[in-house]
Image: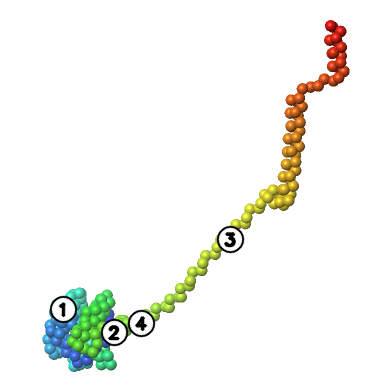
């Protein structure tokens, strides 16, 4: 069965000796994690944490500097051996830098324990010592480059700069329809045509009026015919 190795680190605002002591004390371990813990003193002592979820044995001790333990949880496969946990306490200007080197983790579980060390140990430790009157109440500065030990850091390709979208080009205006022949004629020609039409209309109307007046007027007989008719009337009498 394959295994994984992770490394997590963070800065706690308390001395290395003080954190070392709290880690190996049943009462204080219970208080800063929030889950019941039981720690037997000395090398070879058994321990449990988080209400029995974690259990193991202390293998090596360097007071104020290092703790080495066998470590497993109830989620380990039954045929999996214990993992190995090394806790290093390094003095820094802000307090103590804790480095957790966790190896021999069953394959597929490394990520969840990596997050668990940050959320359920480093951050609670910072709050615990802040309440104890430590130098600062700031949360632990958990390193952001945590990765499986022995693996090369994944180099993410630089994202290409987002290019601003160019405004879509405006559609070309459709060519205007060519004006009809009549519309293309100069205004002067159109005006002249209109005047001619008006004059023709006047002539037609004048002729029409003259024709109507002739029909209405009674026909006049010529003078010779009238004289003949008058002489005939006289002879008859």
Q: Quadrant of the N terminus?
A: bottom left
Q: Nearer the viewer, mark 2 or mark 3?
A: 3
**Callout 4: SS:** loop
Q: Nearer the viewer, residue 17 or 99?
A: 17
Q: Nearer the viewer, mark 4 or mark 3?
A: 3
Whichever of labels 2 and 1 marks the residue nearer the N terminus, that label is 1
Residue plotted at (74% across, 32% down): 209
Whichever of labels 4 and 1 marks the residue nearer the N terminus, that label is 1
Residue plotted at (73% across, 35% down): 205
Tell me if I can see residue 45 in this picture.
no
Q: Would you name the residue on which mark 4 appears?
A: 153
Q: How far apart are the alpha carbons under marks 4 and 1?
A: 34 Å
Residue plotted at (56% across, 61% down): 171
Q: Would you name the residue on which mark 1 appears?
A: 35
Query: How many other residues sit within 10 Å of disc 1, few (<14), some (14-19) or many (≥20)?
Result: some
Q: Nearer the viewer, mark 2 or mark 1?
A: 2
Q: Would you name the residue on which mark 2 appears?
A: 141
Q: Nearer the viewer, residue 36 or 87?
A: 36
Above/below status of 5 relative to 220: below
* Position of residue 228 in the picture relative to residue 108 (left or right): right
Q: Nearer the viewer, mark 4 or mark 1?
A: 1
* Position of residue 10 in the picture relative to residue 163 (left or right): left
Q: How far apart are the alpha carbons under marks 4 and 2?
A: 20 Å
Above/below status of 107 relative to 226: below
Q: Nearer the viewer, mark 3 or mark 1?
A: 3
Q: Would you name the residue on which mark 3 appears?
A: 172
Whichever of labels 2 and 3 marks the residue nearer the N terminus, that label is 2
Q: Quadrant of the C terminus?
A: top right
Specify the label residue 152 is tagged with: none
Whichever of labels 4 and 2 marks the residue nearer the N terminus, that label is 2
């Amino acid at each position: 069965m394959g295994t994984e190795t992770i490394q997590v680190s963070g800065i706690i605002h308390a001395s290395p000796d003080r954190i070392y002591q709290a880690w190996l004390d049943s009462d204080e371990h219970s208080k800063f994690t929030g889950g019941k813990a039981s720690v037997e003193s000395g090398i070879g002592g058994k321990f449990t944490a988080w209400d029995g979820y974690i259990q193991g044995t202390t293998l090596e001790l360097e007071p104020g500097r290092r703790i080495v333990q066998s470590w497993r949880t109830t989620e380990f496969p039954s045929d999996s051996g214990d993992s190995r946990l090394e806790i290093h306490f390094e003095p820094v200007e802000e307090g103590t830098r804790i480095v957790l080197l966790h190896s021999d983790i069953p394959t597929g579980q490394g990520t969840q324990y990596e997050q668990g060390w940050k959320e359920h140990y480093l951050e609670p430790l910072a709050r615990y010592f802040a309440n104890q009157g430590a130098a600062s109440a700031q949360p632990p500065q958990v390193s952001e480059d945590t990765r499986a030990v022995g693996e090369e850091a994944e180099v993410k390709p630089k994202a290409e700069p987002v290019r601003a979208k160019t405004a879509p080009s405006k559609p070309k205006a459709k060519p205007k329809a060519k004006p009809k022949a009549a519309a293309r004629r100069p205004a002067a020609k159109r005006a002249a045509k209109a005047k001619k039409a008006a004059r023709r209309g006047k002539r037609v109307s004048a002729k029409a009026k003259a024709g109507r007046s002739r029909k209405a007027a009674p026909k006049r007989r010529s003078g010779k015919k009238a004289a003949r008719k008058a002489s005939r009337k006289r002879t008859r009498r």
